[in-house]
Image: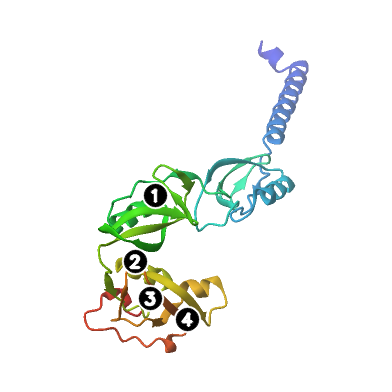
Amino acid sequence: MIKFLLSKTFLVQLALAIVVVSILIWSILKFIDGYTHNGQTITVPLLEGLTVTEVEELLKDKNLSYEILDSVYLEKAQKGVVLEQSPEGNDLVKENRTIYITVSKITPPKISLPDVVDMSQRLAVAKLESYGLKVGRLDYTPSECLNCVVKMSVRGKQVFPEDLIAKGSTVNLTLGSGTSNEQVLVPYLVNLTKDEAIAKLQETFLNIGAEIYEDCKTKADSASARVYRQTPNDGNTINMGASVDVWLTNEASKINYNPPSGSDSLNLPN
């Protein structure tokens, strides 16, 4: 037996077997390597902010595919673009990998208008805003119910509870003015942004009137601009539902902040 194992014939056959097995193992490993593209990775491009058409073209060039995982509506987001992606940009993936994306809806979803009729102005505003709606003008009509909602309208058309309207819509409220011509004090608006001024006016049952912007060249400038002048001035009395005109600027030197004694902290300068 030992003599056979040491024979030339056996050694040759053993060598051939080793070579065949080695070639077989190498072939299998090579096949697996090619099948899985081992070592061949693709950098995932950053897709956020791109439209679906742009995503499709970009991924096609990189031998990647995509699938829309979700579609959501965000009021302040650009419409019809990618908001999130998985895997994230700059991650390394294999060829033909699917990239899952979340895109922003172009049109807002419809929601059922909540019932705020007969509610106080303050409660009505809070409820409407909790539904993703905005409150616009406050108009007044003679009614025994003082400062409670008499009716609602959107774009000049009266709407009713449970009507379907677009999320983010502006709802105008008609409030009861009581049985007499109620008047209110004009609040101090200097150094407030437009949104802060609107909120302040609504607290006192007034509306914002003309908005005059100075030194504002972009939307971002307008959004950050602050009131430096108003008409009527604070302390005057006007009818509920009346409007106050404001002038806004980004030039801090134009804002002469001099609030009346007892003014709240909302007007404090930055």
Question: Which one is nearer the viewer's eye here, 20 or 269?
Answer: 269
Which of pointers 4 and 1 lies earlier in the amino acid sequence?
1
> Circle 2 sits on which residue?
202
> What label does residue 192 carry, if any?
3
Which of pointers 1 and 3 lies earlier in the amino acid sequence?
1
Q: Amino acid at mark 4?
A: Asn
> Circle 4 sits on which residue?
250
Alpha-carbon span between mark 4 and mark 3: 11 Å
Callout 1 secondary element:
loop
Closest to the camera, between mark 4 and mark 1, is 1
Callout 3 secondary element:
loop
Asked if the residue under mark 1 is in contact with the one under mark 4, i.e. CB atoms within 8 Å, the reply is no
Alpha-carbon span between mark 4 and mark 2: 24 Å
Which of pointers 4 and 2 lies earlier in the amino acid sequence?
2
> Circle 1 sits on which residue?
131
Q: Position of residue 249 (x, y in %)?
A: 47, 81
Question: Which one is nearer the viewer's eye here, 180 or 124?
Answer: 180
Alpha-carbon span between mark 3 and mark 2: 14 Å
Alpha-carbon span between mark 1 and mark 3: 25 Å
Q: Position of residue 51 (x, y in %)?
A: 64, 52
Q: Amino acid at mark 2?
A: Gln
Q: Residue furthest left?
A: 262
10 Å crowding of disc 4: few (<14), some (14-19), many (20+): some
Callout 2 secondary element:
helix
Alpha-carbon span between mark 4 and mark 1: 32 Å
